[in-house]
Image (cartoon, grey):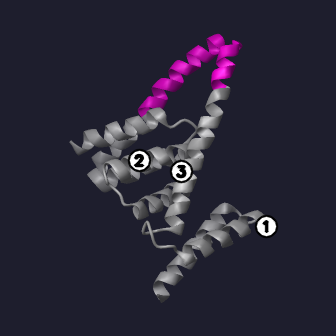
Amino acid sequence: MIYIQLFLSYLQIGAFSFGGGYAAMSLIQAQVVEKYHWLTMGQFTDLVTIAEMTPGPIAINSATFVGTQVGGIFGAFCATIGCILPSCIIVTLLAKVYVKYRNVTVMQNILSTLRPVVVSMIAIAGISILLSVFFPNGADFSIRGTIIFLVALVLLRKTKLQPVSVMVGCGIFELIWQFIC
């Protein structure tokens, strides 16, 4: 039963997450944290970090991670197949339609209409993750998380440091903090 749930959850995520992994984050959170409670919000935040740091698409990395956590190797397989199957089908069909109708105005209007939807999905995922940093327990305000966020933001905006370097630095800081406290 869990394998079917993993497959169907990630099939839904794969079918409705336009715009890539960041846009999928809110859908993934809705499935794995809120609907099935496979992960806590803290684990979901860790999932985002791990999926971001490992090579490959974020949604597929999260499918593999969640599938492994919930159902082992076969769970990872079911979730990953569920995640990529809609894309394979949709892209194949869209490629045929696009080649045939690429110069039609309606096609151009449809594509331009999807842009704000993708931006809003990315914004929702970002705000959700940001709230989990500022309020890790749902109610208590985290001064440490806020300071780390602000320092990372300043480093990314005012220096030429790579985002991965800032992420690693924040991770090292958090490890040191956990070790000391």
The quadrant of the image that shows the N terminus is top left
At x 50%, y 55%, the residue is 51
Question: In 3D space, how far apart are the residues under numbered discs 2 and 1 (Cα atoms)?
Answer: 34 Å
Q: Nearer the viewer, residue 21 or 76?
A: 21
- Which circle marks residue 158 in the picture? 1
Q: Which amino acid type corresponds to the residue marked 3 in the rendered image? A: Ala
For disc 1, the neighbor class at 10 Å (few under 14, some 14 to 19, many from 20) is few
Question: Magenta-highlighted stretch: main secondary structure?
Answer: helix
Q: 108 above or below 12?
A: above
- Quarter of image, res 139: bottom left
Residue 99 visible in rendering = yes
Question: Magenta stretch: residue 94 in it?
Answer: yes
Give residue 108's position: percent from left, percent from top.
Answer: 69, 20
Q: Which amino acid type corresponds to the residue marked 1 in the rendered image? A: Lys
Say left or right for 29 vs 74.
right
Q: Nearer the viewer, residue 119 or 69?
A: 119
* Tally of numbered discs: 3
Give residue 84's position: percent from left, percent from top.
Answer: 44, 36
The residue at which mark 2 appears reads as 30
Say left or right for 69 vs 104.
left
Residue 159 visible in rendering = no
Give residue 74's position: percent from left, percent from top.
Answer: 28, 46
Give residue 125's position: percent from left, percent from top.
Answer: 53, 50
Select label 3 or label 1 by which is in front: 3
Q: Which residues are magenta?
A: 85-111
For marks 2 and 1, the one nearer the N-term is 2
- Which circle marks residue 125 in the picture? 3
Question: In 3D space, how far apart are the residues under numbered discs 3 and 1 (Cα atoms)?
Answer: 24 Å
Whether label 3 touches label 1, CB < 8 Å:
no
Question: Magenta stretch: residue 107 in it?
Answer: yes
For disc 2, the neighbor class at 10 Å (few under 14, some 14 to 19, many from 20) is some
Q: Which amino acid type corresponds to the residue marked 2 in the rendered image? A: Ala
